[in-house]
């Protein structure tokens, strides 16, 4: 398994777990904030640019469709982030309000957060349990043994 897969699975996994737990701990405030956010064109523009950049970075660094479930899940996460960024930039706020209403976001929030936590647990476990995990850490992460400046 590549060091990029290991790094990104750990990064995306830990982010998903921590962000979801933080949001679940303040469910009402999170739902209110997200509902307000999607109706604000300026905020959606900023969020879209950030998500698009993150998605492009993940897709360009890791577009792997073979080698087991973990690399494919990491790749899907990258493409999903890229698509989300594009949709944030392209869809008007009214469309997002309609999407959130159709998904029953307010009442289904615990389910959505739970899915994110489960995916995060899988990615984190896979990233830290990887056969190459010890090689990854011994090589200094993504540096793959590149000497560090003293």
Image: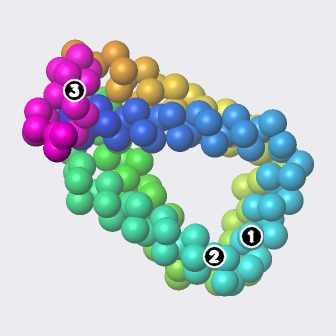
Tell me, yes or no, whether the two marked residues, 1 and 2, touch with CB atoms within 8 Å. Answer: yes
Residue closest to the eye, 108 or 49: 49
Q: Position of residue 78 (x, y in %)?
A: 37, 53
Is 23 rendered above or below residue 141? Answer: below
Q: Residue furthest front?
A: 150
Marking on residue 37: 1
Residue closest to the eye, 104 or 25: 25
Q: Residue furthest left?
A: 146
| Magenta stretch in the rendered image | 133-150
Q: Residue at x 80, y 52 (%)?
A: 30
Tell me the residue that label 3 is attached to: 136
Q: Secondary structure at mark 2?
A: helix
Marking on residue 44: 2
Q: Position of residue 70 (x, y in %)?
A: 32, 31
Q: Residue at x 53, y 41 (%)?
A: 15
Q: Position of residue 82 (x, y in %)?
A: 41, 63
Q: How many marks?
A: 3
The answer to whether residue 85 of the structure is visible from this angle is no
**Image position of 142 (left or right of 29):** left
**Image position of 118 (left or right of 133):** right
Q: CA distance from mark 3 to mark 1?
A: 38 Å
For label 2, the crowd category at 10 Å Cα-Cα, with few meaning under 14, some 14 to 19 and many 20 or more, is many
**Quadrant housing residue 46:** bottom right
Q: Secondary structure at mark 1?
A: helix
């Amino acid at each position: 398994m590549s060091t990029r897969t290991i790094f990104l699975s750990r990064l995306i996994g830990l982010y998903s777990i921590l962000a979801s737990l933080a949001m679940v701990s303040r469910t009402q405030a999170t739902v209110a904030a997200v509902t307000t956010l999607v109706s604000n064109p300026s905020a959606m523009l900023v969020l879209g640019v950030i998500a698009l950049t993150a998605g492009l970075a993940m897709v360009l660094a890791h577009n792997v469709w073979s080698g087991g479930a973990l690399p494919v899940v990491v790749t899907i996460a990258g493409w999903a982030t890229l698509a989300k960024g594009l949709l944030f930039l392209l869809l008007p706020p009214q469309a997002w309000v309609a999407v959130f209403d159709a998904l029953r976001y307010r009442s289904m929030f615990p389910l959505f957060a739970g899915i994110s936590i489960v995916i995060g647990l899988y990615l984190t476990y896979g990233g830290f349990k990887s056969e190459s995990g010890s090689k990854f850490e011994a090589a200094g992460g993504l540096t793959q043994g590149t000497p560090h400046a003293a």
